[in-house]
Image (cartoon, rainbow, N blue to C red):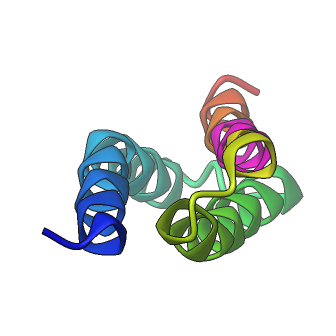
Amino acid sequence: HNPVVGRLERAQSNLYETLPLFIGAVLIAHVTGAESALTLWGAALYFWARVVYVPLYAFGVPYIRSLVWLVSLAGLIMILAALFN
């Protein structure tokens, strides 16, 4: 079993843990009219951090990968925060 394939599978599993919350938060923001610059920036941060996260995980880059994951989490928190403004 190729180590890159294993890391990609783990990156996919990690994405599946947060993606439903992201989708739900974006849909709730849209339906309730809570869309704002905060939701826009939060969604962009989440999306692009997740795009960057996959190759970092695949190539086994440890610390930067964790920082990028935290950026995606910050984006998700921004969207959730917009729901309560």
- Towards the viewer: 53 or 39: 53
Percent coordinates x, y for residue 53 in the rendering: 61, 63
Q: Nearer the viewer, residue 77 or 8?
A: 8
Name the quadrant of the C terminus. Answer: top right
Residue 33 in the image, given as x and y percentages of width and height: 58, 55
Q: Nearer the viewer, residue 74 or 14?
A: 14
Residue 2 placement, left or right of 41: left
Q: Is residue 22 magenta?
A: no
Up the image or down, 29 lies above or below 53; here it is: above
Who's the residue at 68% across and 44% down the image?
A: 62
Q: In the picture provided, is 10 more to the left or to the right than 84?
A: left
x and y percent of residue 76 in the render? 61, 42
Instruction: Answer above or below: position of 75 versus 61.
Output: above
Q: Residue at x 69, y 63 (%)?
A: 49
Q: Magenta stretch?
A: 67-75
Q: Residue, x 78% and y 40% (percent of image)?
A: 63
Q: In the picture, residue 84 is in which quadrant?
A: top right
Q: Quadrant of the rendered structure where residue 35 is?
A: bottom right
| Horizontal relation, residue 37 to residue 39: left or right | right
Could you tell me what secondary structure mostly forms the magenta stretch?
helix
Q: Is residue 72 magenta?
A: yes
Question: From the image, which quarter does the N terminus lie in?
Answer: bottom left
Q: Residue at x 68, y 56 (%)?
A: 61
